[in-house]
Amino acid sequence: MANQAYPFTTFNFLVQLTIDNASSLGLSSSLCSMEFSECDGLEMTMEPKTVREGGNNSQQIHLVGPVSYGNLTLKRGMTTNLDFWKWFSLATGNTRRGTKASGEILMRDGAKNNTVRFKLTDCLPLKIKAPALNAKDGILAIEEMQITYSSFTVELA
């Protein structure tokens, strides 16, 4: 039988974010290189420009319009690595305002081999959320971060 293509699984992925000169900013060399419990928001949308030709009432012409990108939402169990919080403070503070990162999201197969790579450019933190603190639930502390990006590309790893 011919070579079959199996669909990728979505439960095994790795997120890597890096900032140029991170050590001079008091951050790890890699802002993060870890697995998250959830990663959502890899999307791009093109808004077509519709043109109506004079005298032709039966059809429209669609041209390529501007492309917009979603916001990436990352969720993970809170650890002692607070680089996300430090990056948010840097990017929104006065001294290093607008500190951008670049990122990669690697989808992996069951043997932990990389299958697909999403490359993100010009990442900025939008929102960071501390875990809900509730003594009666006794669940894992999950922190959440939203990141905006200028564009992304997809390639086979």
Image (cartoon, rainbow, N blue to C red):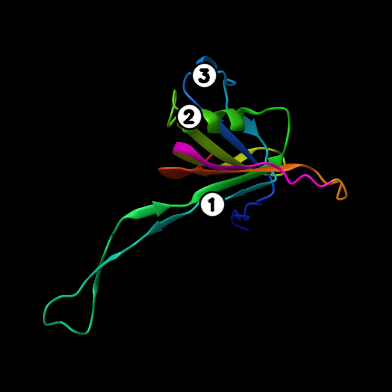
Q: Which mark is residue 137?
A: none
At x 46%, y 22%, the residue is 20
Q: Is residue 132 above or below residue 90?
A: below
Residue 108 visible in this rendered orientation of the protein? no
Image location of residue 104, percent across then percent down: 53, 37
Q: Mark 3 points at which residue?
A: 25
Badge 3: how crowded within 10 Å, few (<14), some, or many (20+)?
A: some
Q: Earlier in the sequence, mark 1 or mark 3?
A: 3
Q: Residue at x 48, y 18 (%)?
A: 21
Q: What element carries label 3?
A: helix
**Does any portion of residue 21 appear in the rendered image?**
yes
Please give the count of numbered marks on the rendered protein: 3
Q: Position of residue 110 (x, y in %)?
A: 72, 44
Residue denoted by label 1? 41
Q: Is the magenta stretch mostly helix, strand or loop?
A: strand
* Highlighted magenta segment, given as a residue range: 122-134
- Image mark for residue 93: 2
Q: Quadrant of residue 56?
A: bottom left
Mark 3 belongs to which amino acid?
A: Leu
- Is the residue marked by circle 1 packed among few (<14), some (14-19), or many (20+) residues within 10 Å? some
Q: Residue furthest front?
A: 94
In front: label 3 or label 2: 2
Name the residue type under label 2.
Answer: Gly
**Mark 1 vs mark 3: in front:** 3
What's the CA distance linking mark 3 and mark 2? 12 Å
Among the two numbered marks 2 and 1 on one chain, the one whose residue lies closer to the N terminus: 1
Q: Where is residue 108 in the image (x, y as percent from the top left)?
A: 64, 42
